[in-house]
Image: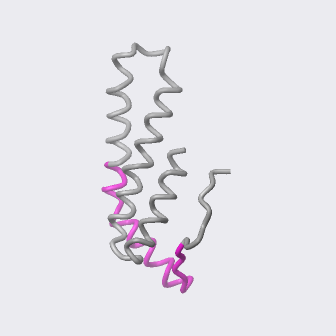
Amino acid sequence: MGEYSNSVVLSKMKIITKGKWLWTRTIGSTVVGELVDSLIFVTIAFLGVLPTELIIPLIISNYLFKTGVEVLFTPITYKVVNFLKKAEQEDYYDINVAYTPV
């Protein structure tokens, strides 16, 4: 669900920004996707295994770490995206797409 949320937000933001501001799209979609992922994963993996008072700090630290990695990797993402757009001479927009997870 986290990856799905990330993909939908990234796709919709690309349309809204008309393909500009890649960093806002990658970080913005990560903020949403990693929140969903961290909430679901940590809850399923550790609820009943770890003391309840550790679950929220674990969700927060998991979320902050993964979101921080995305922020740090943004310059690399720019290089990869620009390389691929140039090599493939393509730039996709998910217009009129039905966003269904199945």
Q: In this view, does 57 lie above or below 4?
A: above
Q: Which residue is drawn at 33% across and 34% down?
A: 60
In magenta, the rendered stretch is 68-93
Q: Which residue is drawn at 52% across and 50% down?
A: 3
x, y (%) of residue 30?
A: 40, 53
The part of the image, by quadrant, that contains residue 79 is: bottom left
Q: Residue at x 34, y 42 (%)?
A: 65
x, y (%) of residue 37?
A: 47, 40
Q: Is residue 57 above or below residue 51?
A: below
Magenta: main secondary structure equals helix
Q: Nearer the viewer, residue 47 or 99?
A: 99
x, y (%) of residue 22?
A: 37, 70
Which scheme is used to colour this image of the protein?
one colour
The part of the image, by quadrant, that contains residue 13 is: bottom left
x, y (%) of residue 2?
A: 50, 45
Q: Is residue 16 above or below residue 52?
A: below
Residue that extends furthest to the right in the rendered view of this protein: 102
Total marks shown come to 0
Q: Which residue is drawn at 51% across and 77% down?
A: 84
Q: Nearer the viewer, residue 42 or 65?
A: 42
**Residue 80 is a magenta residue:** yes
**Residue 4 is a magenta residue:** no
Image quarter hosting the N terminus: top right
